[in-house]
Image: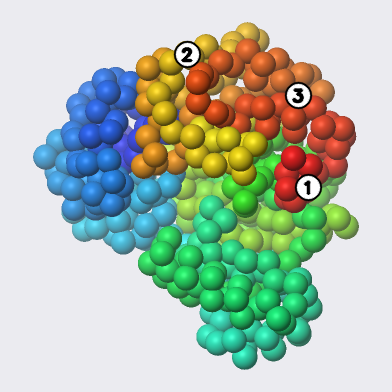
Amino acid sequence: MLSRILIANRGEIALRVIRACHEMGIETVAVYSEADRNASYVRLATESVCIGPPDCNQSYLNIPRIISAAEVTNVDAIHPGYGFLAENANFAEICKDCGITFIGPPVEAMRQLGDKVEARKLARRAKVPVVPGSDGVIENEKEALRLANEIGYPVIIKAVAGGGGRGMRVVHNDISLHAALASARSEAEVAFGEGSVYMEKFIVEPRHVEVQVMADQEGNVVHFFERDCSIQRRHQKMIEESPCPVLEERDRERLAEAAIRLIKEAHYVNAATVEFLLDKEGNFYFIEVNTRIQVEHPVTEMITGQDLIKWQLRIAGGEPMTLRQKDIRHQGVAIECRINAEDPANNFSPCPGTIARYIAPGGPGVRIDTHVHQGWTISPNYDSLIAKIIVHQETRAEAIATMRRALQEFVIEPIKTTIPACLEILSHNLFVKGRIDTGFVERSL
């Protein structure tokens, strides 16, 4: 059992992990930048350490400073949360070399699944369907042209080390391929320090469906059903729900079985999310594995009654899972809305600033995950996520009604937020009917 852990992150996920730890009797160490000095989770942690100025490269992405904080405070593990260093295999390896448990997968599994090309090869070995595309990295424009014409336009260029929609370009013809290839490589190099890209067939109007998986150190693997994350802007998720409203039970089982096969093939340990695209004919294709806990994990917690963070901690401490697949049941419908400090009327541009008035919603079936409060300043240095509203009800119609009511109650002033956009989506006839895909927001808002 772990006794003292450091949370190498900030915001609502830092608070989420601290709360789970304290309920389990585990001491916590919060690291923070100068911009987050007055954050609520810093006060709630057992101990806290300032690791640098607001610039993330000098604080939350600075591995030497985080490792130094861990050693000084004598922790036995580090939880990376999501974002920042959560999927950085070098960081995980340094933790291991320093005798600190990394609360995540083994380094080898993280490296293999973090490389999109290698992950596709692994999926093929596990007999998991993949989107038609390149077998490896695209080396030059000539190869890209040949492959694009072979698999047929439209195609999508993706960064090998990508995520969050960065390093991705959709291409519709030979003329635009050159510029798309160059810009995808350039963006990937800036965002991830790695400019390699690969190519896939672009599935027109797909749904984005992902399976939450957990694996222990003894080879036991279970799934916690799926989440539909099709409501996105610029490849970044806005609204997630479970179950996927269009999946038949047999297809749900096939999707989950494919995710488990892949995780077993990778000899994976701890939490993972296996992501798929679902086409109009009901075919699913593997796209990637997120080797960490995800922003939308509360959706799964609401419909299963399981605390995924606590399972992460138990598994990292060497405990075998006592859960078996038959013990995990799907009850009702859960929906999550991400509330960001962004202006939907201005192409979702960031809106940092100080929250002068904050009133959170409540009532039956409503959960709020947030670290902000009245007087809190949203920094321009970090992701614009303010809060997550999660609702849980017996039916999808009831969940939508509860979410709309909760959003209407939520007051965050004077900064602009995505609340109006979420309300517009939830009121849209096609969303209510479940007839959505990953391009819905661009077409409808």
Instruction: From this view, report whether residue 441 is shown above or below residue 338.
Output: below
Do labels 1 and 2 touch, CB within 8 Å?
A: no
Around disc 3, counting alpha carbons within 10 Å, would you say few (fewer than 14), some (14 to 19), or many (20 or more)?
A: many
Q: Earlier in the sequence, mark 3 or mark 2?
A: 2
Do labels 3 and 1 touch, CB within 8 Å?
A: no
Instruction: From this view, report whether residue 132 is shown above or below residue 417.
Output: below
Residue at horizontal 31 percent and vertical 61 percent from the top: 90
- Check the image and name the residue furthest to the left: 72
- Which element carries disc 3, helix, strand or loop? helix
Do labels 3 and 2 touch, CB within 8 Å?
A: no
x, y percentage for residue 16?
A: 42, 28
- Check the image and name the residue furthest to the front: 346
Q: Earlier in the sequence, mark 1 or mark 2?
A: 2
Q: Which residue is mark 1?
A: 443
Residue at horizontal 11 percent and vertical 40 percent from the top: 72
> Callout 3, which amino acid?
Ile
x, y percentage for residue 100?
A: 23, 48
Residue 357 disc label? 2
The residues bearing labels 1 and 2 have C-alpha atoms spaced at a distance of: 33 Å
Residue at horizontal 23 percent and vertical 34 percent from the top: 34
> Callout 1, which amino acid?
Arg
x, y percentage for residue 388?
A: 55, 28
Around disc 1, counting alpha carbons within 10 Å, would you say few (fewer than 14), some (14 to 19), or many (20 or more)?
A: few
Q: Which residue is mark 3?
A: 400
> Callout 2, which amino acid?
Arg
Q: Nearer the viewer, mark 3 or mark 2?
A: 2
The residues bearing labels 3 and 2 have C-alpha atoms spaced at a distance of: 26 Å
| Quadrant of the snapshot with the N terminus | top left
Instruction: From this view, report whether residue 36 is shown above or below residue 165.
Output: above
Q: Earlier in the sequence, mark 3 or mark 1?
A: 3
- Which sits in the foreground, 286 or 260? 286
- Which element carries disc 1, helix, strand or loop? helix
